[in-house]
Image (cartoon, rainbow, N blue to C red):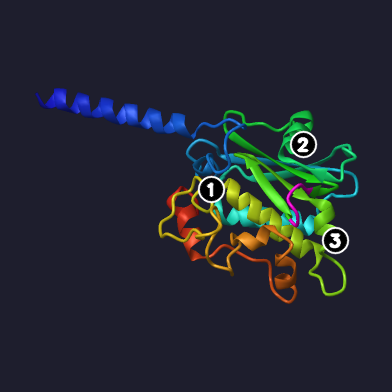
């Protein structure tokens, strides 16, 4: 009788384990934040490859790329490493880009996709602005995001403006934070800290995931201040979903 009970228990555990492993295997065409655990944990994907697709003249600063890599190393469990490569793509000769435009550009030029043990992400840097005014970046799929080079250049590097590296790093980290499931869009909150009037963002104005960070409003704040980091509530969320 005991042997039978052990067999039933082992079967239940086996089904549970298989289901969990299946759930963490993801595609590259799902909703933002839905692959949070796949990014954060090492249960299935041991490595992360990021491809930055940039239009001529809009290659992110090397320091910005390194800052993004440091941010991800701090929070992701990827024992086989995090690699970032860049690839120049043709300009679309547009001054304004919509979500549909971004998806089309990605479809035409992205070459990094998930394989057995490697998760892949895409970042597009376009030579124009977003269809919503003053937006610096947007995450639009579970492994896809874009930043708007023209808007960044207009708000960085000049008199009474933050450096390009500081603004660029902040928006890259912010949008990747959404891909990681922050705030409450795939990464469950340990403590309720989602902004009441700005869903998907933190209610702490000193946090990387505050809503104003993805708009030009953040530029003035960054003058004389360091690149923003996530606050303790956001850290707890990442840790609770498989992150460091």
Instruction: Please give the label number shown on residue 208.
Output: none
Badge 1 or badge 3: first in the primary sequence: 3
Q: Is residue 151 left or right of residue 184?
A: right
Q: Between 156 and 10, which is closer to the camera in this rendering?
A: 156
**Residue pushed farthest bottom?**
224
Coordinates of residue 118 in the picture (x, y in percent): 61, 35
Coordinates of residue 61 in the picture (x, y in percent): 81, 56
Q: Between 41 and 79, which is closer to the camera in this rendering?
A: 41
* Marks 2/1: CA–CA distance: 23 Å
Query: Pointer 2 and pointer 3: residues touching (CB < 8 Å)?
Result: no
Which span is picked out in magenta? 130-134
* Marks 2/3: CA–CA distance: 22 Å
Q: For numbered disc 3, what is the local secondary structure?
A: helix
Q: For numbered disc 1, what is the local secondary structure?
A: loop
Residue that appears at 72% across and 56% down = 66
Q: Residues within 10 Å of mark 3 (few under 14, many from 20)?
A: few
Q: Is residue 64 left or right of residue 33?
A: right
Q: Mark 3 sits on what residue?
A: 154
Q: For numbered disc 2, what is the local secondary structure?
A: helix
Vertical comparison of 28 with 79: above or below: above
Image depth: mark 2 or mark 1 in front:
2
Coordinates of residue 13 in the picture (x, y in percent): 29, 31
Instruction: Please give the label number shown on residue 181.
Output: 1
Q: Mark 2 sits on what residue?
A: 101
Q: Which quadrant holds residue 145?
A: top right
Residue that appears at 56% across and 45% down = 79
Q: Residues within 10 Å of mark 2 (few under 14, many from 20)?
A: few
Badge 2 or badge 3: first in the primary sequence: 2
Q: Which quadrant holds residue 202?
A: bottom right
């Amino acid at each position: 009788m005991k042997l039978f009970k052990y067999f039933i228990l082992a079967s239940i555990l086996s089904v549970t384990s298989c289901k969990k492993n299946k759930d963490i295997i993801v595609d590259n065409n799902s909703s933002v934040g839905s692959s949070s655990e796949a990014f954060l944990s090492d249960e299935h994907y041991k490595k992360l490859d990021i491809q930055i697709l940039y239009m001529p003249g809009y290659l992110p600063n090397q320091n910005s790329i390194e800052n993004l890599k440091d941010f991800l190393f701090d929070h992701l469990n990827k024992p086989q490493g995090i690699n970032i490569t860049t690839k120049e793509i043709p300009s679309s000769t547009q001054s304004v880009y919509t979500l549909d435009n971004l998806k089309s550009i990605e479809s035409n030029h992205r070459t990094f996709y998930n394989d057995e043990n490697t998760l892949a992400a895409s970042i597009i840097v376009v030579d124009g602005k977003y269809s919503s005014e003053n937006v610096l970046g947007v995450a639009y799929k579970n492994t896809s995001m874009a930043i708007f080079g023209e808007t960044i250049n207009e708000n960085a590097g000049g008199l009474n403006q933050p450096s390009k590296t500081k603004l660029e790093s902040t928006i890259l980290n912010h949008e990747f934070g959404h891909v990681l499931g922050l705030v409450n869009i795939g990464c469950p909150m340990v403590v309720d800290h989602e902004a009441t009037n700005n869903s998907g963002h933190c209610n702490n104005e000193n946090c990387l995931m505050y809503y104003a960070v993805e708009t030009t409003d953040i530029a003035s704040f960054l003058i004389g201040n360091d690149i923003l980091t996530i606050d303790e509530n956001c850290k707890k969320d990442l840790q609770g979903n498989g992150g460091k």
